[in-house]
Amino acid sequence: MFRNLLLTLLTFCIAIGGGAASVWYALDADDGFDALHVGAWTAFPDLGTTKASPYAKAAAARDGVLALGHAEGIRFIASRDSAGRPLSVACTYRVAGNTPPARFWTLFPADPHSLMPLKAKPGLPGKLQSWAVLRQPDGSFAVTVGPHPAPGNWLAINGGGGMVLALTLYDTPAATSSEVGSLELPRIKRVGCDG
């Protein structure tokens, strides 16, 4: 009798633990359902609409992410550089190129789990927006993201561990375009790492 009770409890633990682990894995999958990949960047254009998958809605609710509708904009997240290597706070990156047309955009390094902006040391730039970016004569821009000061556009990071880059385009036709997959976004190149 005790053996049957023990086997029943073990079965329930495996079933509940396995089910919870599979749901957590599905919610954390970068590719996810309805994911749009543009180079190193990933977005979920349907997240703020009624077309969003239940898994995408659940992941957004769990993480407390503010989902943008098509008329509001689109957020792209990069967890790897353009060569496919995971982004690290200990490394320096160059984010260069153009963004699709948008009334306004922001770029910041963020925690990979909460998507909250990483805190830079006081007095150092931790976020960048389109109205303050220094541009090249052809309209493109280059931003250095790293722990050491750099000339031009620089985003300061500190600490250790992984990070993601969040690029949010506001009031952009890219969010509603049927050719959203043909967008060009800035490339992310690793310049070097400490240690």
Image (spheres, rainbow, N blue to C red):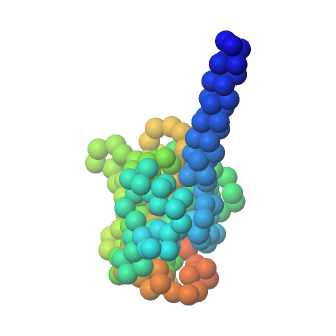
Identify the residue at horizontal 43%, vertical 50% (top origin). 63
Decide which of 60, 152 is in the foreground and name it.
60
Would you place residue 111 above or below residue 14 in this image?
below
Query: Which quarter of the figure is the C terminus placed in?
Result: top right
Q: Is residue 150 left or right of residue 170?
A: right
Residue at the farthest left position: 123
Where residue 95 appears, x then y in whole percent?
53, 64
Residue 61, by quadrant, is: bottom left
Identify the residue at horizontal 36%, vertical 46% (top origin). 120
Where residue 185 appears, x then y in whole percent?
55, 74
Would you place residue 192 above or below residue 81 in this image?
above
Identify the residue at horizontal 65%, vertical 36% (top origin). 15
Is residue 65 at least partly visible in the picture?
yes
Decide which of 56, 161 is in the foreground and name it.
56
Where residue 46 appears, x then y in whole percent?
49, 73
Decide which of 48, 20 is in the foreground and name it.
20
Residue at the farthest top position: 2
Is residue 144 at least partly visible in the picture?
no
Would you place residue 87 above or below residue 69 in this image?
above
Decide which of 20, 64 is in the foreground and name it.
20
Would you place residue 157 above or below residue 65 in this image?
above
Q: Is residue 80 left or right of residue 143?
A: right
Where residue 119 appears, x then y in whole percent?
36, 45
Query: Which quarter of the figure is the N terminus placed in?
Result: top right
Identify the residue at horizontal 63%, vertical 24% (top origin). 9
